[in-house]
Amino acid sequence: WPAMAEDIAAIERLKRTRGAIVLAHNYQTPEIFHTVSDIVGDSLALAREAAKTDADVIVVAGVHFMAETAKLLNPDKTVLIPDSRAGCSLAESITPADVRALRLAHPGVPVITYVNTSAALKAETDICCTSGNALKVVESLGVPKVIMVPDEYLARNIAAQTDVEIITWGGHCEVHERFSVADIAEIRAAYGDVTVIAHPECPPEVVAASDFAGSTAEMIGFVDTRRPTRVALVTECSMADNVAVHYPEVDFVRPCNLCPHMKRITLSGIRRALETMGEEVTIDPAIAAAARRSVERMLAIG
Ligand code: 13P
Ligand code: SF4
């Protein structure tokens, strides 16, 4: 505890001297989420807030693609990530050459990329989406068929809600793919009156067995508006820890799988990032403009 308090005090001091803010994803541990973070949210909220900030320095307490998105939207600012090894199995699952091959196989079909991808991947695609706006983005294009990469399960979960045909890829989130229908059945058997909320990166049969599916922000919105007596958030471990603090009257069942990438970000890492001004996120100018266009098109949809 004393070491943690010392890190928090140092980070607050450094934020002032550097003109910095800390953006934190909903999967960050409570000691980051509830202390040094200036903005917390899902991937969509972090992208939106990154586009608005007038801070000189942005520290991203999240994974690498989130820091790249912040940099794309703030090319002249310093964007830091406390540990650049914080990757994502989805971002790793596809290359720009794969997208070019998909385009050749499906000429004229627009390509939507999940925000959980590298800037180089985004540069090959027409528009980005997050789990919070994927349906809206698919339907905004006004076409009968789209390519949506790389998350197979997100694409199939969205396809179940629209008439637009969705061609997808075989990428999976290593955290959410591990949840099974048996897990949901076990939760329901153990807690009769539980509301089960799944992230749409889960397999479609898990989503079908749940009561609601949505992005991490939509999960919070559901708890906030519906106030279920008991809820199971079928997602990364820190999520329920962070949300439960605000809803003491709601009983949180905590099924969870840990994201090892998100967990690379620590308080001491954030402190070190601000002390050393590293690791700075940079994006090859040759791909930045095209990647930025994809993100900005998404943000314009609202
Ligand atoms: P959202 O916060 O956009 O729901 O994304 C979840 C996730 O896995 C981010 O890496
Ligand atoms: Fe990637 Fe899944 Fe971790 Fe999110 S939770 S960063 S999608 S591996």
Image (spheres, rainbow, N blue to C red):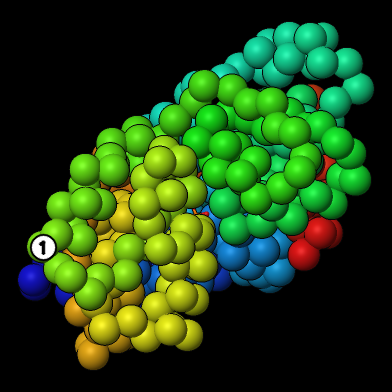
**Amino acid at dot 1:** Ala
Q: Is residue 230 visible?
A: yes
| Horizontal relation, residue 162 to residue 151: left or right | right
| Horizontal relation, residue 19 to residue 206: left or right | right
Quarter of the picture holding the C terminus: bottom right
| Horizontal relation, residue 103 to residue 248: left or right | right
Q: Position of residue 225 (x, y in %)?
A: 47, 85
**Distance from mark 1 CB to nearest ligand 2 atom below 8 Å:** no
What is the crowding at mark 1: few (fewer than 14 residues within 10 Å), some, or many (at least 20)?
few
Q: Nearer the viewer, residue 39 or 83?
A: 39
In the displayed structure, would residue 1 be above or below residue 42?
below
- Return the residue at label 1: 190
Name the image quarter holding residue 231: bottom left
* SS category of the residue bearing label 1: helix
Extreme bottom residue here?
A: 249
Q: Residue at x 25, y 71 (%)?
A: 194
Q: Position of residue 164 (x, y in %)?
A: 77, 40
In the displayed structure, would residue 288 be above or below residue 72?
above
In the displayed structure, would residue 29 be above or below residue 249?
above
Q: Nearer the viewer, residue 99 or 46?
A: 99
How many badges with numbers are in the image? 1
Quarter of the picture holding the N terminus: bottom left
Q: Residue at x 32, y 74 (%)?
A: 243
Q: Residue at x 81, y 32 (%)?
A: 145
Q: Is residue 272 visible?
A: no
Q: Position of residue 156 (x, y in %)?
A: 57, 37
Name the image quarter holding residue 175: top left
Q: Position of residue 66 (x, y in %)?
A: 54, 47
